Structure formats: structure tokens, C-alpha cells
Amino acid sequence: MPLLVMKFGGTSVADLERIRNAAGKVQREVERGYDVIVIVSAMSGKTNELVGWVEQTSPLFDAREYDAVVSSGENVTAGLMALTLQEMGVPARSWQGWQVPINTTDAHSAARFVDIPRDNIDRKFAEGFKVAVIAGFQGIGPDGRITTLGRGGSDTTAVAFAAAFGAERCDIYTDVDGIYTTDPRITNKARKLEKIAFEEMLELASLGAKVLQTRSVELAMRYKVRLRVLSSFEETDENSGTLVCDEDEIMESKVVNGVAYSREEAKITLVTVEDRPGISAAIFAPLAEAGVNVDMIVQNISEKDYEDHPGSVTDMTFSVPINQVERARKVMEEARTAGHIAYEELIADTEVAKVSVVGIGMRSATGVAARMFRALADENINIKVIATSEIKISVLIERKYMELAVQALHDAFGLEAA
Amino acid sequence: MPLLVMKFGGTSVADLERIRNAAGKVQREVERGYDVIVIVSAMSGKTNELVGWVEQTSPLFDAREYDAVVSSGENVTAGLMALTLQEMGVPARSWQGWQVPINTTDAHSAARFVDIPRDNIDRKFAEGFKVAVIAGFQGIGPDGRITTLGRGGSDTTAVAFAAAFGAERCDIYTDVDGIYTTDPRITNKARKLEKIAFEEMLELASLGAKVLQTRSVELAMRYKVRLRVLSSFEETDENSGTLVCDEDEIMESKVVNGVAYSREEAKITLVTVEDRPGISAAIFAPLAEAGVNVDMIVQNISEKDYEDHPGSVTDMTFSVPINQVERARKVMEEARTAGHIAYEELIADTEVAKVSVVGIGMRSATGVAARMFRALADENINIKVIATSEIKISVLIERKYMELAVQALHDAFGLEAA
């Protein structure tokens, strides 16, 4: 029997009516001949309520108890989904993480999958059940305690089941109808993509296109699980949504497939840093230890010799999430006080945004960067920092030009046309 | 290490502040040198919310899924209670039914305990944990599915743990401060009892004194678990509340220790029933099968011979919960139509109430019934049905006299004075 994994997020199961709607989509796949594994999130708002209770109870909470409390939201939805399917005449059974069992590491609140044995669920399918409803986001650790995977872990649960059960596809039902070339709120020329490669999706996800959890895309790429993103709130068929797949499945690709952005960026420049071997490590190791997420890094080599800096000096610029600026400043000042690094001044610019163009076609194309810079220059947008990877070019610009930049790049790379 | 079981009901853990208050009581017992097993209910209202969702989803719900959904309320409280205790510096760990494991039968939604192995929890106590917080009302069936014990099952969980772990006592914290001689809302002369025997508590519980679940008292009696009922909302010490215990612990007992009542009664009389061997079975077997809870039964022997009733005839009177009158009528009419019984008329009186006096002292005392009937006669209250057991006398009377009857009996048996 071919098998499908279907995942419904919190807004898709927010109340009984929406659960019924989601169950209708499951029923349709069963009628098409599939065995289905359904992964559900908690009803929207429930997990936040539970997390709030835990944090109010114990600011430095025991992660074992946090997991025991917070996982209960998904258990409720799983049972209600199974009941709804039964009511529709579809033989269904719910499974909590420990019942499958979904074996994970014991890293509570941030557990990783170890193993998902198929036996129990396969036996139920063999008995005639058509649907296994799995509480997402949770598992069981080596000590028999409940674990959770961290927020958004239900997407990852879905991909892990698709891999373990060799599913034909993993359909992620959410509140948008697919992946777009850019945010439709910024330009109405944004176009829904039929297909997108894993690598592109990864860059888009980590750049702020919040549809899919980065971790779930990584896992899908590793196990070549075909992911489909589609809407819970529309009539859908086998062509709906966007397929996230191996690039081999994508016949022809544009050079650039998407324009992503992030508003929550800040630029930090250390002015007149002593330039010596090991200076980068001396700067970025303590930032990493303090949990500061450094993204882009640029070093301006300076050949000047100052009297009080006998060696050469440089300016070091990097970007961090805007809410980590003060933490970064504190870490740098402590490192300077401790004598680990030397710099004259730390300048933080919190009025920046990041805009990126992404496309696997970039690997074999030339002149993409030039085309991007030209498009921005035509709008008089000054580029503050540039970073490139194999399939992505990102720039930091003044935040007030962000929308304009996205629109200009969307036009420049012809993304409106399919 | 001496061990105590402490159970907190839904109103005692209704929000984070009340959970803190309850945890304070646990901490005090730990400071006194006890290891403590805490049994918690769901935050009040939560179970009803979950049951509502299940019933709206599937009127004839699958009890396995019902149990999976409904048990989640207790899991949340258990985790929050463990976190609260940890925050107070008390080493605590939460346990869901399957983790202990609390092994039950597979009678979903009405499961019974099979076995509560001590190993896992004993090991935690040996590691230095002082408190095990157990999600009440739930267990795990032989097929690895979650079971629940039926509403109010958390009291029963508490008693079962007290029995399994040889607890010194099982303290049931609730929203009243003990067991009273009668309902204080009916007479302000009602007095809190220091001690009450299991048998008396059983009669009072099943007669409508809703403080303790009948089933938990039965279990406590069987395993001689000393139960204490006391208030979550007051300062309590080792003398608070009411101790429910073996009658051996009660030095001297009054003849009557309590006056109970139930408003939800109806009286049904089958007029001119053919009186023959097996007629009682023919009447009450189909009622039992239809789930009608028959309580008191009275048969008036009639010696008259009617022309169309060649044998002797009788009138048969019994009481049922008021909301089961129509079901009882339907069952009787069907039995008559099928020719299993014969009667002329069914008269239902839905304006009755039951009043009972209860006391283990009755066993050795005489004249209790006479004193009861005299007290009612003095108030001109007519008795419609009488039923007696070893430690209880119950009467059905007109409902409008119920409060008056309770007050008169409370006075007549001198219950105000300790």
C-alpha cells in the first residue's frame, strides 16, 4: 500500500471545525488508496499557554518537566483527529511519542531523533487501520521521560516519519498555499513556485521565509523526502502547493528563484582592530559561547600602521539579530577588558535589513552579483555588507529601502513570469 | 522513611497560585520527614473542556481515544506541581500513568487497577527525590493504550498508591474542611466529625455527600488505608479535617453519626402486579440491563384475588434517580408488551426525596428506627418508603419536607454536640 505523511500545523487544527476540515483531506487520500500517517501540532495558542504556565512557575525550569507539560497539547489534537476520522468512517488510531516509540536523545526541549521503529504502526496498518495519527513535536528519551524537539518540531516529526516509513511524499498543510518567489505582502508580483530545490528552500527558510522549519528541510534533504507545502484552508488536489524536492526533479531552473529578506538585523563594526593571526577566533568564539548568532562577516584589510598599533590594523564588521546587539557589545567589552582583543570603538547600526537572492541556477551562471548590485544601484540603494554562498547572495542595506530593494530584485531577475 | 500520600482535587490546583499553595502543604510534610506521593487532578474545568471536545467530535466516541484526550489534563498539573516543588527546593519528579506504570484493565473510561509496581518510584526516592507527583485518574491497559478510571478517579488513584506503598495516611485535600454530620447549608448545627468509620463514609458518599468517591472509600476499607479529608484553602496541621478510618480506631461512637439526603429521587409504583415466583427478577433484570439504578424496593403483599388475576396480586414500589424515570417507564412497558410481566398501571412520583440516618452504633442499639419515625411524625412528615441496612435507615418523603426532615433528625439524634 503506498503511504503518505500529512502534517497539520496549529492553525490548521485550531478548533473542532478545522480538525474536521483537515480530517476531510486525510479521508480523500485514504479514498485514493493511501495508508496515511498524520502528524498534528497542538491547537494554536495551546503550546504558548502551557509554556507560559511553566515559565511563570519556574523561570529556570527543569526541562524534563517542561517537556512533560508542553507535549500534552499535541496529545489532545491527536486523539481528537483520530476520533474525527473514525466518525467519518476511516479506521484511525492516535499515537503519543512514547507509544510508537519515537526514540530521541535525552536533550530535553531540543531532542534529536535516534530511531522510529515501524513495528507497532505497521501492525496496526496490517490490522486494517488506514490512518495513524501521531502527536508531533515529542518523543521519548533513553530514561523513559518525555522529550520535545523544540518549537516547530512537528514539521521535523513529519519528515522523520516519511523517511522511516518510505512515504511517497510528506505534505505539510499550513496557512499559506505554497512557497513564493518573495513575500506577497511586499510585491503583488510575487509568484507561487511549483517546485523548489531543498537547497533553495533551506536558504529561504533560514533567511526568514517562515513556512518550513530549517531543520525539517535539512532532514528532508538528507533522506530525499519529497515535501509539499500547501494550504489547509483551500480545496487542494495532487497539483496544489509547492513541492520541495531534489534538484534532479526540477527540469529547468531560473538563475534566481526567490528574494528573501530579514528586518531583524543589526550591523556591528569593531573599528581599528589589531590585526594578527587568531584575531577572528578571539572575536567570534566568545560571541558564539554567549549564544550570539553572528551571520555575515566582513573584514576590511588595512595596511596603515599607527604609532600606538605597531602591527597592521583592520575594521571588522558582522551582523547579528537586532535583539542580540547589547549582548554582543557586552561580550566584546569583556574580551577587551580581559586583554583578549583590542579595538578602538564598537559601532552598532540597528537600522539595517538583509536582502538575499537565492537560486541553484547561480552555480552555473555568471554575472548574478553584478546584476543584483546594478538593480540596487539603479534605485540609489547603498550596499553596506555583502556575503555570498554557492546559491545565494545577501546584502545588508538601510532598512528603509528594504521593500524597494525586494521589488527591484524581483523585477530584475524576472521572477513574476513562470 | 515514612511515606504520605497527598491528593489535590481540581479546585485545589485550579491555577498556578493554588498549585503553589498546595505545594506549600507538600513541602511542610517533607520538612516533617516524610517522603510524599502527590496525586493531582486536572485544573478545574479542564477535564470538562476536553470531554466536551470529544463529545462534540464523536457522540459515540471510541473510549480509547477519549482516554487519550481526557487524561492530558492531569499530565499538565503533574508537571506544573513538580516544577513548583523544585522551585521551592524540594526534589520532585512527575509521573504519568504509563511511566509508573499504573497497570489497569482495558475497560477504557472505567478501568480498574491491576497492579502498581513500586520499583521505578522507589528508585527515585532512593536517588534523593522527596516527592513523586502522579497524574491521577489514569493508567495504562494491557495493550499499551492509556486508560482512565472514570470521573473522580483521582481519589481512587490516591488510595491505590497509599495501599501499594504502605503509606502512613492518605490525605485528600479538597474544597471542604472535613466530613459533617449533615450538609451545613441545611442546618447551621451541622458539626464537623473528627473521625468516621469507612462503612459510615460509604453510606454517606453513596447517599449524596459528595466529598469522596464511593469507589475510593471501598478501596480504602479493603486495604485499611487511613484517609483524611481536609481543606486546601486553610492552614492545616496534623489534627485538621476528618479521618476516615477503621471502626476500631473510633473509641466511642454515637448511634447515629450523620444525616444524608438526596433530592434527585423518584418513586415508581407498579399497581396490581401479578404476584408469582420470579416476578421480582422479571421486573428488575430488564431495568438493570437498561442501566436504571434502582435503589429502594418495597413490595406490598396483597391477598386479594381478582377475577382477571387468578393468582394473588401485589403492588411493587421502587426508587430510581429522577432523570431515569422515563427510561424505567419504557423498559416496564416493553416488558409488559412482551408478556414478561403484568401490571395495571405505572405511577411515577417525581416529587420525593430520600433522607437517611447513618451510624455504625446502630448495630448494637435498638429503637433507632422508632426514634427516627417519631421525629418525622412530630413534624407531620409522611413516610412513603422505608429501607434499612445494618448501619442505615432511609426513608422517601415529599421533597418539600426534605430540609425540615434533615433538621429534625439532626436534632433528634443529638448530632450538634460532639
Image (tube, coloured by chain):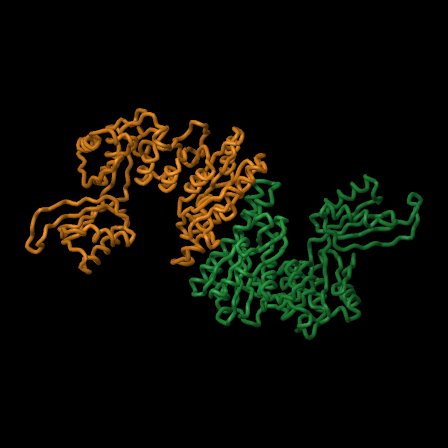
Chain colours: A green, B orange
Q: Relative to B97, is A274 on the left or the right?
A: right
**Viewer-closest of B387 and A221:** B387
Q: Which residue is drawn at 67% across and 69% down?
A: A246
Q: Quadrant of residue A343?
A: top right
**Viewer-closest of A206 and B338:** B338
Identity of the residue furthest to the left in this view: B307
Q: Which residue is drawn at 25% across and 50% down?
A: B325
Q: Relative to B129, is B362 on the left or the right?
A: left
Report the quarter where the C terminus of chain A lies: bottom right
In the image, residue B186 sits, relative to residue A82, either above or below, namely above
Q: Which residue is drawn at 58% across and 34% down?
A: B89
Q: Relative to A320, is A224 on the left or the right?
A: left
Q: Relative to B46, is A143 on the left or the right?
A: right
| Residue A361 locus on image (x, y percent) | 73, 70
Q: Can residue A88 be seen from the camera position used here?
A: yes
| Residue B239 locus on image (x, y percent) | 42, 27
**Viewer-closest of A409 and A66:** A66
| Residue A286 locus on image (x, y percent) | 77, 46
